[in-house]
Amino acid sequence: MPLVTVKMLEGRTDEQKRNLVEKVTEAVKETTGAAEEKIIVMIEEMRKDHYAVAGKRISDTE
């Protein structure tokens, strides 16, 4: 039972997340041969003030 976790910054629409889950599921199915009903995809959204690159929070650089 493959389990895929996608971590990304908040701000995507429901449609974007739906498409992401469908495409990740299809990629896992194609590459591993796992049955679609056994593939789990979890999306973990991070707030922009909880993520930093090069010592700067993303929320501070926008």
Image (cartoon, grey):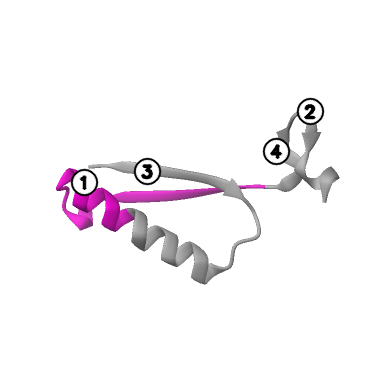
Secondary structure of residue under mark 4 = loop
| Residue 48 spot, x, y in % from top left | 73, 46
Residue that numbered label 4 is attached to: 51
Query: Farthest residue in the right direction?
Result: 60
Residue that numbered label 3 is attached to: 4
Inter-mark Cα distance, 3 to 1: 13 Å
The amino acid marked with disc number 4 is Tyr
Residue that numbered label 2 is attached to: 55
Residue range of the region highlighted in magenta in the rendering: 25-46
Secondary structure of residue under mark 2 = loop
Inter-mark Cα distance, 1 to 4: 31 Å
Secondary structure of residue under mark 1 = helix
Which one is earlier in the sequence, the residue at label 3 or at label 1?
A: 3
**Disc 4: CA contacts within 10 A as few (<14), some (14-19) or many (>=20):** some
Q: Are marks 2 and 1 in contact (CB under 8 Å)?
A: no
Which one is earlier in the sequence, the residue at label 4 or at label 3?
A: 3
Q: Residue 52 vs residue 62: left or right?
A: left
Q: Residue 47 vs residue 35: left or right?
A: right
Q: Residue 27 vs residue 34: left or right?
A: right
The circle drawn on residue 31 is 1
From the image, state whether disc 1 or disc 4 is nearer to you.
1
The amino acid marked with disc number 2 is Gly
Q: Residue at x 73, y 35 (%)?
A: 52
Relative depth, front residue between 50 and 58: 58
Inter-mark Cα distance, 4 to 3: 20 Å
Which one is earlier in the sequence, the residue at label 2 or at label 3?
A: 3
Q: Are marks 3 and 1 in contact (CB under 8 Å)?
A: no
| Residue 53 spot, x, y in % from top left | 72, 33
